Amino acid sequence: MFVTSAVCVLVFLYVTSVACRADREPECSRFHYEEQLLEKMVRMEFNMERLQQRLDSVSEVVAKLEGIRKQLTGKI
């Protein structure tokens, strides 16, 4: 009877400890956090390069339009 009670108590303690761990938020390792941060930085760098290319193309168009404007106002 004592052994059965002891086993029941141990099983109960084990189940409650597992349940407590399940209720907490999942823990992330430092490696996982750094990997996500690096991935985010790479995406940001890619987006910055794309924006720089768009800005360069818009600057070229503005320069061409400025040249056309100067030609037209110079002829009038």
Image (cartoon, helix red, strand yellow):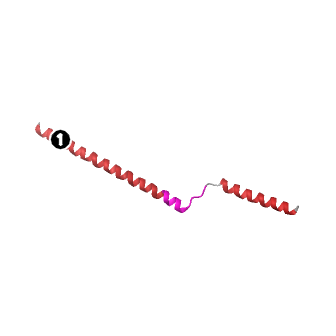
Asked if residue 32 lies in the magenta stretch, the reply is yes
Residue lying at the far top in this picture: please name it.
76
The spot of residue 30 in percent (x, y) is 54, 62
Can you say whether 70 is above or below 16 in the image? Answer: above
User: How many marks overall?
Assistant: 1
In-image side of 29 versus 75 (left or right): right
Asked if residue 31 lies in the magenta stretch, the reply is yes
Badge 1 amino acid? Ile
In-image side of 15 versus 48 (left or right): right
Work out which quarter of the rendered image holds the C terminus and state it.
Answer: top left
The spot of residue 10 in percent (x, y) is 78, 61
For the residue pair 15 and 56, the one nearer the viewer reads as 15
Residue marked by disc 1: 68
Q: Quadrant of residue 24?
A: bottom right
For the residue pair 41 and 11, the one nearer the viewer reads as 11
Residue lying at the far left in this picture: please name it.
75
In-image side of 44 versus 12 (left or right): left
Dot 1 crowding, Cα within 10 Å, few <14, some 14–19, many 20+ = few
Residue lying at the far right in this picture: please name it.
1
Magenta highlight range: 26-36
The spot of residue 75 in percent (x, y) is 11, 38
Q: Which residue is pictured at 84% across the width and 60% down the height?
A: 5
Q: Which residue is pictured at 49% across the width and 59% down the height?
A: 35
Label 1 secondary element: helix
Work out which quarter of the rendered image holds the N terminus and state it.
Answer: bottom right
Can you say whether 66 is above or below 15 in the image? Answer: above
Q: Which residue is pictured at 12% across the width and 40% down the height?
A: 74
Can you say whether 57 is above or below 41 in the image? Answer: above
Classified by dominant secondary structure, the portion drawn in magenta counts as helix
The spot of residue 44 in percent (x, y) is 41, 53
